[in-house]
Image (cartoon, grey):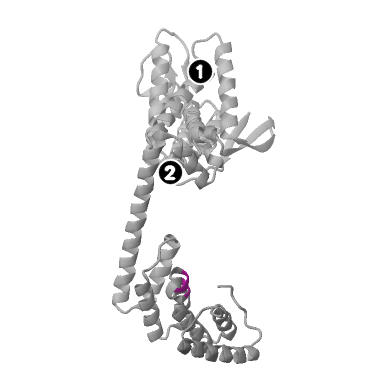
Amino acid sequence: MFIPYETDAPVYHLPITTGALIATNVVMFVMTIVEPEYIKQWYLPFGELTPLRWVTSNLTHGDIFHLLGNMFGLWSFGLVVEGKVGALRMLAIVALIGLAEPAIVQVVMLGATTGGAIGFSGIVFGLMAICLIWAPENEMSCLMFLFIFYAITFDVTIYNMATILLILNFVGAVWSDRTITTEMLHLIGAVLGGGIGLAMLRQGWVECENWDIFSCIRGLNRMTEEERERELAKRPEHQEAEREKREERRRQREEESRHATEQVRAVLANGNAEAATKLYEAIKRRLPRWELPEPDLRRCIQTLHEQQRWEQSLPLMLACIRAYPANATVVQLKLAEVLLLKCGRPGQALRTLEQLAHTALPEALQQRTAKLVAAARQLREQNPYEVIEEW
């Protein structure tokens, strides 16, 4: 017996529904221990139609090992599914599988006079089938019991684990002479889950980032962004969709950039350069490709200098030099001047000035540069232990 308990699949939503379902199953199990008669009231009887038990039978377990096996499976596969679609859609998926499977079983077994079913395993197999479609090459960490008190752990891809379990259950279902077996219940859940997972993928209701089973078959998950775009460009059915996605991303970036610029301008208009700088740095962490327009960036630097906030102006001057190199000479000189005269960093100032050595400067700027270089060298000799950063 082996039990999955952890996955390396990316998780974008907290497992709220998964955790709530585990808690509910545990509570229901404790209730059956306190009052064993509840099992008779909650199990799914064959030969009848009992819609209320389509719910309760999923939450009922025969013993602690039955419960633990299903809850480990629910945690691992639920983490992947809910991590991609969120709590509400996860709840809807579980409800669809959990209601459809017992309904199908009771309809098929209407002629039976004995027998029944309990357990969450049909839903677990449904979630496993969804994971097989959405994240086949992600790995599961599993616990295998070799003896009662001895177990080992190992990692296996969702594809390999799901394939093995489906084959074993298929063989078990075919081998049995009964109409409905545990293996058949598992397979019904897997078929339902697979259908849901496939439909959601095709409708674009889940983002698998080219790690779904179809993308993995085509090798898109192993390609670079450029290789992937070239491969998709060969497929006419993807061209228009990809173009629309790129255009939408471009519009979104433009809107985010416009809004970010307006935010900084609004703060800067109040003369609060320190707050504008902090806002600028926060936005840059969130939107690395965004940059404040050069006039606004220079205005922010100038305001910081007027308020004698020299250290705070350094990152902005560096950003201005890198983003707008065509007009960077004056800013570089000012940066060197601030480093030398205001921040006491002659070595760093000298490194900045050396970058101007091969730049054609007007005579006035050449004289200014020469004076700064001479002063920086003199002060550098007095402080040879200054740490020089690579800018």
For mark 2, does the 10 Å Cα neighbourhood hold few (<14), some (14 to 19), or many (20 or more) residues? some
- Mark 1–mark 2 contact, CB under 8 Å? no
Helix, strand or loop: magenta stretch:
helix
What are the residue bounds of the magenta stretch?
318-322
Name the amino acid type tagged 2. Answer: Ile
Closer-to-camera residue (146/57): 146
Closer-to-camera residue (260/27): 260
Element at label 2: helix
Residue 168 placement: quadrant: top right
Give residue 1's position: percent from left, percent from top.
63, 28
| Residue tagged 1 | 184
User: Looking at the image, which residue is at 45% across and 79% down?
Assistant: 331
User: Looking at the image, which residue is at 31% across and 73% down?
Assistant: 267
Q: Is residue 89 above or below residue 49?
A: below
| Mark 1 or mark 2, earlier in chain | 2
Q: Quadrant of the C terminus?
A: bottom right
| Residue tagged 2 | 16
Q: Is residue 23 visible?
A: no
Q: Is residue 124 magenta?
A: no
163 relative position to 206: left or right: right
Give residue 132's position: percent from left, percent from top.
51, 31
